[in-house]
Image (tube, rainbow, N blue to C red):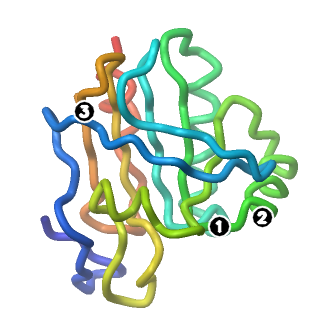
Amino acid sequence: MSVKFKGNPVVLSAHTIKVGDKAPVVELVGKDLSSITIGGAKDEYQIINVVPSLDTGVCATQARRFNQEAAKISNAKVYVVSMDLPFAQGRFCTTEGIENLVVLSDFVDKTFGKAYGLLLQSGPLKGLLTRSVIVINPQGEVIYTEVCEEITNEPHYDNALNAIK
């Protein structure tokens, strides 16, 4: 898979998750420092909205858009995952009025980034997650993925949302 940051190629970790894969179960840290598990089978769809850092314009736009869309969805839990510290995530949510997303951090041991193959291994953002969206059905199977070819570009929101309709 080819991913670029500002036109320059970067390398992702390991196997990047794809449609048809069983979604790995991983434990992440909530903005309140709670432990939250995502992936695997659940009673509803999971939309995992992945950003390098909520402290950038494109990432903030992506989180705001999924926050708006999440308010309209009754059969899915919508997450945003980044490497930001939970304290910064909480501040972002308060400032931006983000109330419909579950905000999670992969800062502890990068379990999510490694398991889903979304950890940047090279480039200026090395150690962060690449911009992507993953949709998991209630049976725990990945039914949609988008890894943005250019990290500075927003994902195709409607494609991800249509995967659960």
Q: Quadrant of residue 14?
A: bottom left
Q: The C terminus lies in which quarter of the figure?
A: top left
- On the image, numbered disc 3 is attached to which residue? 142
Q: Secondary structure at mark 2?
A: helix
The 10 Å Cα crowd at callout 1, few under 14, some 14 to 19, many 20 or more, is many
Q: CA distance from mark 1 to mark 3?
A: 25 Å
Q: Amino acid at mark 3?
A: Val
State the residue at coordinates (42%, 54%).
154
Q: Secondary structure at mark 1?
A: loop
Residue 149 appears left or right of 132: left
Q: Amino acid at mark 2?
A: Ala
- On the image, numbered disc 2 is attached to which residue? 88
State the residue at coordinates (28%, 55%).
147
- Position in image of residue 124 (x %, y %): 43, 90
The 10 Å Cα crowd at callout 3, few under 14, some 14 to 19, many 20 or more, is many
Q: The N terminus lies in which quarter of the figure?
A: bottom left
Q: Secondary structure at mark 3?
A: strand
- Position in image of residue 76 (x %, y %): 49, 19
Labelled pair 2, 1 in contact (Cβ < 8 Å): yes
- Position in image of residue 89 (x %, y %): 74, 57
Residue 73 appears left or right of 34: left
Q: Amino acid at mark 1?
A: Asp
- On the image, numbered disc 1 is attached to which residue? 84
Residue 77 appears left or right of 12: right
Most foreground residue, 165 or 77 = 77
Q: Is residue 94 above or below residue 52?
A: above
